[in-house]
Amino acid sequence: MPVANRQMYPQAALASAPLSPMIPTKNLSTIRGTQEYEQAVDQIISNGILKTTLAINKVIASSAKDHARNIVFAPMSITGALALILLGSNGKTFQEITSVMGLATGIEKLNVKSQIIHEQFGRMIRKMEAKSGIEVGKEVNIASAIFVQADYPIRALYAETARSIYGSEVLNVDFQKSSGLAQQNINSWVSSKTNGKITEIIADDLPQSTRVVIVSAMYFKAQWEFPFFPGTTNKRPFYTNGRKSKATIEVEMMSNGGYFPYYKDHNLNCEVLGFPYKGNKTTMYVVMPFNSNKDVLKELELRITPEDINRLVDSTVYTKAVLLFPKMRIESTIDLKESLQSLGVKTLFDPSEANLGLLSPGVRGDIVKPMASSSIPVKAPLPLPVNRHSENDNDVLIFSRLRDVSNCTTNTTTKLSRRIKEDVETLDSIRTYINEQSSDNNFMNPGLYADRVVHKVFMDITESGTEAAASTAISLSRDGSRIPFRVDVPFFFFIRHEETKTVFFWGSVNSPVPSFKIV
């Protein structure tokens, strides 16, 4: 029995679907039948995100220090963070990020107008939040905010648009005079937004030169559609170096049985099984190589392609299976600087070339020529409420300035009723105006650059599920037709939103935590 929502969208429709940057989100309902158009755009974006996922994972897998440890990251959230940077960038930095975002979304030629990516990506995020089948707040906790040096002004329009599209707060801290307190405040804020699950997202001291920190963190714990059997979890060996070697650790293995999406691929030499979450709208797919060990897993991760991933999922059929799977906690903090540089985002980390001119015009004391009021709309800054957090990105970007700053603080907020299209178009107009004046030396880059890009995810995988747990016991018949799926060797997994085919999370597990040393 094939999975119901696994049908790919026709390529002909993809080719003919309009992707004009002048199409407001609200008008999609009147264009080419709405649902078909949105499905086409969703698939283009999700395919691009999958490409970026594998590109980032290959950088991590090829790193000697990373390939042997457990890794988990959230591709959709990384793309959301890139979109937030795109919103505030200009010049070569803007061009590099549009190139990567073209890869991340499948929408090319964004170097003139960024409106299309914010419209379509923002719409897709809201769609997935509304239709993921996961109850936000109880099972998913995502925190996002922009922490700004107290005397560093943020463009009101940038703050408004970032909030209206991506739900980001803007909060003031003083890195220059109280960097330790700023670090403590950031960690406390994240802890409060994740119910204490993530208590430290900034582990080391922040330099006093830091001027902007964009921080978000994700905690994920969702219910299974078919929960693992309570009371049957037992310690069993886990073979980090393969089943032919002697096990050195034991892990808590959960057991389950029933019909699950399953496929064995002899081209890739692996098998895949899907664990649906409650509502069957989101699924965790576990990919386990034949004769797996750390090196075999790494080899598969380095050669697998987006087409392979889609083919694996599309080939699964519901099959009677008996499962053993580790009960584990995955907490991963990754510096994505190397990965983003490998994708082409280079100037963002270069003090002499980075340009975040749309985020800020520069602090008081910088020589910045004012823009003509007839050319650019002027908005008065408004007080910022701080009781809302984002639900879509989980990256930390720490920016530094090259020169000292003086006292000039601007707090801004968003007018939630303002249309995204108008806000982004205005930012594009500011970008165009600045570029037209690029020959004027008085138009200075505000001097922000990224020191690091730190990404943190915390995930619990347990037996917990719904009250329908007892109904799955009927699948444990002893007729010999069951597929054994014993995950006691290294594997990778991804959690996918089925309707849009978008990867929420990607992870590699070489040694589950917690584990117990065999003596």
Image (cartoon, rainbow, N blue to C red):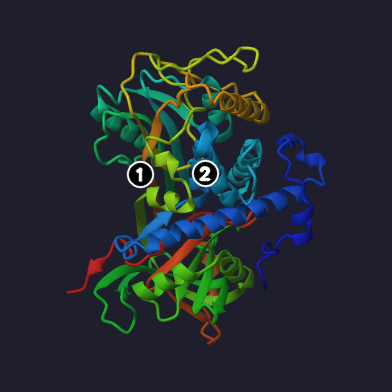
Identity of the amino acid at label 2? Glu
The 10 Å Cα crowd at callout 2, few under 14, some 14 to 19, many 20 or more, is many
Q: How many marks?
A: 2
Identify the residue at image location x=32%, y=76%: 239
Q: Nearer the viewer, mark 1 or mark 2?
A: 2
> Label 1 belongs to which residue?
197
Question: Label 2 near label 1: C-beta < 8 Å?
Answer: no
In the visual, does 299 lie left or right of 429?
left
- Residue 474 appears in view: yes
Q: Nearer the viewer, residue 499 or 429?
A: 429
- Residue 462 appears in view: no
Q: Secondary structure at mark 1?
A: loop
Which residue is outermost to the left? 519
Identity of the amino acid at label 1? Lys
On the image, the x and y values in percent for residue 325 come to: 41, 69
In the visual, does 515 lie left or right of 169?
left
Q: Which mark is residue 492?
A: none
On the image, the x and y values in percent for residue 279 come to: 60, 55
Asked if residue 500 is positioned above or below residue 137 in the image, the reply reads below
> Label 2 belongs to which residue?
96
The 10 Å Cα crowd at callout 1, few under 14, some 14 to 19, many 20 or more, is some
Residue 296 placement: quadrant:
bottom left
Residue 189 placement: quadrant:
top left
On the image, the x and y values in percent for residue 277 come to: 54, 58
On the image, the x and y values in percent for residue 345 come to: 46, 46
Whichever of callouts 1 and 2 sits on the residue coming sooner in the sequence is: 2
Q: Nearer the viewer, residue 233 or 276?
A: 276
Q: Quadrant of the N terminus?
A: bottom right
Q: Nearer the viewer, residue 20 or 462?
A: 20
Identify the residue at image location x=38%, y=71%: 490
Q: Secondary structure at mark 2?
A: helix
> Distance from label 1 to label 2 (Cα)?
35 Å
